[in-house]
Structures are given as C-alpha cells and as structure tokens.
Image (cartoon, rainbow, N blue to C red):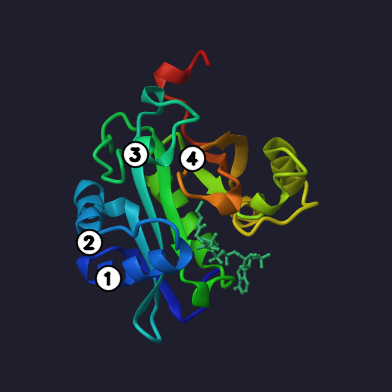
Amino acid sequence: MLPPNYRIRLMGSSDFEEIRDICKLVYPTETAYTCEELEEHHRVFPQGQFVALDSSQGAVAGVHFTLRLRMIDFHLDDPWDVLTARGTFSDHNPVTGHTLYGADIMVHPAHQHHGIAHALTDITRGLVQEEGLWRMVGASRLPGYGKRCASMGAEQYVAAVQRGELVDPVLTAHLRDGWTVVRPIHGYLSHDDESGGWAAVIQWVNPACPPPPEFELR
Ligand SMILES: CC(C)(COP(=O)(O)OP(=O)(O)OC[C@H]1O[C@@H](n2cnc3c(N)ncnc32)[C@H](O)[C@@H]1OP(=O)(O)O)[C@@H](O)C(=O)NCCC(=O)NCCS
C-alpha cells in the first residue's frame, strides 16, 4: 500500500517540531499543537500515536492521533474539544474505552495523494483489532462544502459525496479508506469555514468484536 520510501512507526519526541510545521500548513486557521500537548498524547496512549516517515529524507510525512473513549459518556454531536478534553487526551480510557477515536489525521501537502492516509488508517484498524475494540470513530472535515453551503444542505452534500457524485478532498479519501458515514454534525471544529462549520461523523466497526454491554439495547 505504502510507496517503498515510506514507513510507519509510533511517534517520538524528535517528531514534535515537524508535526507542528505540518499542522500549521494544513490547518492555517487553527492553533498548532504545542510540544507539551504532543508529549501528553504520547504519555497517555503511546501505541495510538502514529507517524508516517519519508525514509529517503528522514522527514515526517503524516500522522494519526488516537485515544480510547467510552462513547456512552459523550454525545454524537460533541465537538473535537469535548471529545479530546481540549486536546489533552486526558479522557483516554484504557479499560472501558471500547471505541478508538481518531482525533486527527494529517498529511504534509508535499506527501498527499500517495496513500499515506490510507496506510495510517489501516495500521490504526490493526490497533483496533489487536486491542479487541468495538470500532473506530472520527469526524471528517468537509472542506468542499463551504463553497456549496448556500445552495445545498450538509445532509444533501454528504449523501452526494457518498454516492460519488461529488468529490470532497477529505471525506472522499476517508470513504475510500473504509470509513462509513454516521451523520453530518455542526460545530465540530470552531474555525472550519472551509467546511461551512460542518463535519461528518464516520466509523469503522470491527466485525470480530461485539458492542460493549452498555450499547446492547441501542
Ligand atoms: C485528508 C488527508 C489526510 C488525506 O491524506 P492523503 O495521504 O493524501 O490520502 P491518500 O493518499 O491515502 O488518499 C488520497 C488520494 O490518493 C490516492 N492514492 C492512494 N494511493 C496512492 C498512490 N500510491 N499514488 C497516488 N495516489 C494514491 C487515493 O486514491 C486518493 O484518491 P484521490 O486522488 O482521488 O484523492 C489529507 O488531505 C490532509 O492532511 N488534509 C488536511 C488535514 C485534514 O483535513 N485532515 C482530515 C481531518 S478529518
């Protein structure tokens, strides 16, 4: 899946500055992670923080940050700040967190369209299977929606992307990577004008693992 000059490993402190640089490039309107926040992610759940490396240049090409959540403690509409405890990951629950929450996936623009996000998603799916988790959940930005929001609703837009009639730079990649849409939500990120303030909750359910007891009757 990955081109031969790339490999994936767990994040280490030597990656932090490069991750901050990628963050500034792909989310110019957001505040980049601080090294302290990245250190904290690493401290609470080291096996859930993945880095893709371009081994020919020794450079970080992309990342996927995850934590385990007990989803019954949250609501489907909750924004990123709530789900990640304001980016600290202090709500990571290693015992009854049956859902792996994909807090962020980003690929340096110079390395996009090489299958890096796909490979980062596959390795994360492997973690869900290894840890015997129920599913992984995330929220896809919809950067193609902002310029269409005057003419169509977010539900309509997401359905058109699912049918392949429209291409969204982020949601289309997630759908190709095996995620399915749960539903669009508003207000997931505070400064995402490109997405018209919307996102789509997405999930991948582990066929080998039943839902935890608290979800059985839902
Ligand atoms: C969304 C994002 C993570 C996707 O990363 P990516 O590494 O480019 O994604 P992939 O390469 O796996 O898939 C994207 C495309 O590359 C294609 N592709 C996959 N393998 C490929 C390969 N070996 N060679 C060329 N293209 C390839 C895929 O088919 C897909 O198709 P597309 O050209 O129609 O888009 C990236 O665009 C990004 O960082 N965006 C900004 C941050 C962001 O919004 N993150 C999402 C938060 S929800």
Q: Which residue appears at 22% of the width and 71% of the height?
A: 14
Secondary structure beneath dot 1 equals: helix
Q: Nearer the viewer, residue 87 or 46?
A: 87
Q: Is residue 91 left or right of residue 150?
A: left
Do tag 4 and tag 3 residues touch (Cβ < 8 Å)?
Answer: no
Q: Please indicate, yes or no, whether residue 178 appears anywhere in the rendered image.
A: no
Q: Nearer the viewer, mark 1 or mark 4?
A: 4
x and y percentages locating residue 197 in the rendered image: 56, 43
Do tag 2 and tag 1 residues touch (Cβ < 8 Å)?
Answer: yes
Ligand 1 shows up in the quarter that is bottom right
Location of mark 1 (residue): 17
Secondary structure beneath dot 3 equals: strand
Q: Nearer the viewer, residue 216 or 130?
A: 216
Secondary structure beneath dot 4 equals: loop
x and y percentages locating residue 21 in the rendered image: 36, 71
Q: Quadrant of residue 182?
A: top right
194 versus 10 height, above or below: above
Question: Upstream in the sequence, badge 1 or badge 4?
Answer: 1
Instruction: Name the amino acid type tagged 3.
Output: Arg
The circle on residue 188 is 4
Q: Nearer the viewer, residue 25 or 169?
A: 25
Q: Nearer the viewer, residue 100 or 198?
A: 198
Query: Disc 1 and disc 4: Cα gap in Å?
Result: 26 Å
Query: Disc 4 and disc 3: Cα gap in Å?
Result: 18 Å
Mark 1 surroundings within 10 Å by alpha-carbon count, few (fewer than 14), some (14 through 19), many (20 or more): some
The circle on residue 84 is none
Residue at the farthest bottom position: 56
The circle on residue 68 is 3
Location of mark 2 (residue): 35
Instruction: Name the amino acid type tagged 1.
Output: Glu
Q: Please indicate, yes or no, whether residue 203 appears anywhere in the rendered image.
A: yes
